[in-house]
Amino acid sequence: MHRNLYSASLLDLCFVRELMVQIMEARTTDKILHALETFRIEVPSWGFANTGTRFGKFIQAAAATTTEEKFSDAGQVQALTGICPTVALHVLWDLPDGLGSTTEVGKLADRYGVRPGSINPNVFQDQIYKYGSFGNPDERARRQALEHSRLSVQIAKELGSRDVSFWFTDGSNYPGTANIRERKRRFEESLKAVHAELAPNQRMLVEYKPFEPAFYHTDIADWGMAMHFARSSGSQAKVLVDTGHHYQSQNIEQIVAWLLSEDMLGGFHFNDRKYADDDLTLGSIDPYQVFRIFHEIVFFEWETGKPADIAYMIDQSHNLKGKIEAMLQTVNMAQELFAKATLVDHERLAAAQKNSDLIRAESCLQDAFATDVRPAIREWRKSKGLPEDPLEAFRSSGYLERISVQRAERNNAGVSSYA
Ligand code: LRH
Ligand code: MN
């Protein structure tokens, strides 16, 4: 009699346990599906082009050269993933005629189903910028940089782009060759002038980088300098964090937490690196790093109860991997790592942090990071009529074969050498 009761209760227990597991899994899946509804990430036009290092460029026949080809490739990524509705444009590379190119770009956006995203001025490749742009002692270089920046704001208005994203190569290579305080003053002056051009709904993003191409000092070298310049420019200026722009072992998620706390975080340029600004595909070296960044943002949103106004963007140049495949791989990785970060049990974490329960707190992140979110992501894609595996869908689409034939001749004509 007892044995039956015991085995019956054991069975009940297993059943209840199974039920609990299913409920937990269903809850986890719901959390992921909800998070995926709003997660969007912008692709960079230059990620589809033939790029290289200073030691050479390995030409890909299928690489995009024209702005139309970049929109076409970005259109593929959007069609296959459903989470990349915008493409970042670099003014000199994608809008060769400046304002004169906006009509054509508008048509391309309609034709390929991706909208122009952040507008990136280029005040670093012209010869006049040898000693810098806004920081340059030569007033002519500063004036040209300001004109180009004002034009970039106009272009953004024409294209309906919200963000104008600034990165400067300004700096010096040898001690004593630059008056760092003087250059700082010039940057404050010029950035304020650019900010004054913004429409009420627009933002100015200030990107920092510790070195390269300047190798002694860089005028906007870290988050603190970028935050200072953003604040001194005006209320619509925020900081852009490029994950590749940090010294080894720098705690990037702490910078993110600070910028969130200061309401100065505007956006990200995601990529990965082992050494410096290597522009490797996101999560290829340190996926837990990206997870920790997403965790700080999702935790902040849980605490404040409101979504953080952040532009998630990719900034990579694919020197060896197929450009579109690398982009699809990156978008997929970003989606997975963001989904994992939404699984952190924030109630449990906050309590553990309050009680300095280190193991429990840490395991909140590790449990979420260890969760396989791929089945739920596949379910979300299916529910949207999207391919469950975008990369496989791309490989069997024939698109790569088609563009390789169409573009080979022009690309193979473009071989260049370092010196
Ligand atoms: C500089 C940078 C910047 C760009 C460029 C393509 O390293 O990150 O964001 O404009 O890459
Ligand atoms: Mn960048």
Image (tube, rainbow, N blue to C red):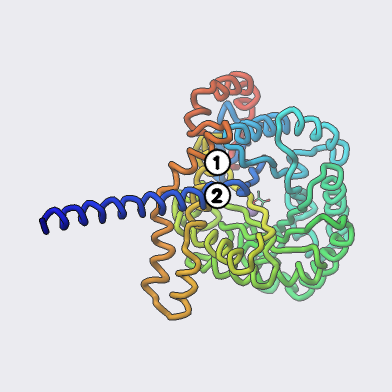
Q: Which residue is denoted by mark 1 in the rendering?
A: 318
Q: Earlier in the sequence, mark 2 or mark 1?
A: 2
Question: In the picture, residue 399 is in which quadrant?
Answer: top right
What's the residue at 42%, 65% (across, down)? 364
**Crowding near the residue tagged with mark 1, few <14, some 14–19, many ≥20 C-alpha atoms within 10 Å:** many
The label number, if any, that marks residue 62 in the structure image: none
Return the x and y of residue 139 as percentages of the image width and height.
87, 62
Return the x and y of residue 228 as percentages of the image width and height.
73, 72
The label number, if any, that marks residue 279 in the structure image: 2
Q: Is mark 2 within 8 Å of ligand 1?
A: yes
> Mark 1 is on which residue type?
His
Q: How far separated are the C-alphas under marks 2 and 1? A: 7 Å
What's the residue at 68%, 33% (across, down)? 70
Left or right side of 356 for 238: right
Does residue 174 appear anywhere in the picture? no
> Mark 2 is on which residue type?
Asp
Left or right side of 394 for 79: right
Question: In the picture, residue 6 is in which quadrant?
Answer: bottom left
